[in-house]
Amino acid sequence: MLATVPNVSEGRDAAAIEEIGRAFASRATLLDVHADADHHRSVFTLVADPEPLVESLVAGIALALELVDLRLHDGIHPKAGAVDVVPLVPLVPQHMDLAKEAALTVAQRVGTELGVPVFLYGLVGADRRPAFFRRGGPAELQRRVESGELRPDAGPGSLAARSGAVLVGARPALVAYNVDLGTMDVEIARGIATAIRESSGGMPGVQAIGLALPGSGRVQVSMNVLDLVRSPLHEVLARVEREAAVRGVAVMEGELVGLVPEIVLADASAAGATIPGVDESRVLERALGLST
């Protein structure tokens, strides 16, 4: 079995999110749906064997492209398209080749059958990250294509304003976790993100950005933790809390996007730590009936 967590640029229309979820679950098991109105984004967690998973992804992406119009989109999360990222993830490391093969199949079918430009990332895309394509949004991505800097790996050579592009990749499992701060100053969130992310000298395998949340009047540090061995999630959270305290700001809430591997809770328990928003109900192995 493989997992996938397609990110769709729709986080407010409950009926549309439910309909897209049903399409993604046409031949796969839908384990979780995380919708966020401020991000205007939904993350669907699916598992299946490779062939039915590919079919389910193509069906869900097709419907999402029908229902989501980027021209009307005002979410705060960076994005490349109406269906932003589609990562294929092995449940065990030994199956990474299966994930790569499935990712390439999804990319080719989305480009050919749905007529949307596809860019590859991760282990099928020269280790490039989604941020490489997202910077500046779909309009900037189109400019880079027109200038000859980039070329889609599948599909047409230009982005439609309604749908943008789809980023398809293969990667190991990661944890997406957001921390809301008790301030309206987005520069504080950006400063904390800079302090903790690996690319600016922070924690290994941590990606982070600072965002303003219009709905709550707060700001957020939005993170992906790629290396749970060198940077356990409870230690990442503790670092955010320390960086916030230095800046005179309180951490208000923690939010998990999707599910976590069982090791996240085990490591936190061994350290006597708790992680807001993360409990046994959010463990991937438990959702699959594999928990020990």
Image (cartoon, helix red, strand yellow):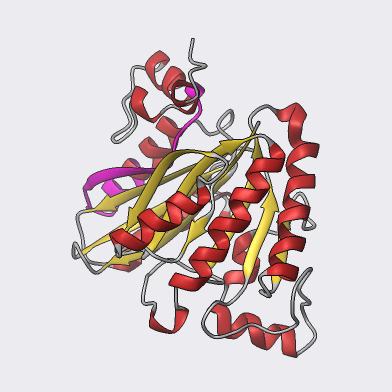
Q: Does 200 sit left or right of 270 as displayed? A: right
Q: Can the viewer see residue 63?
A: yes
Q: Is residue 57 above or below residue 203?
A: below
Out of 135 and 172, give the one closest to the viewer.
172
In this rendering, is residue 83 above or below 224?
below
Q: As drawn, which residue projects farthest toward the top? A: 292
Residue 261 at x, y percent in the picture: 51, 28
Q: Is residue 259 magenta?
A: yes
Q: Dividing the image into 4 quarters, which one contains the N terminus?
A: top right
Left or right: residue 223 versus residue 178 is right
- Residue 149 vertical position relative to residue 271 in the rendered view, above or below: below
- In the rendered image, residue 240, in percent from the top left (x then y), is placed at 37, 44
Give residue 216's quadrant in the image. Answer: bottom left
Q: Say whether residue 119 is left or right of residue 176.
A: right
Residue 191 can be seen in this image: no
| Number of numbered discs | 0
Residue extent of the magenta highlight: 242-263
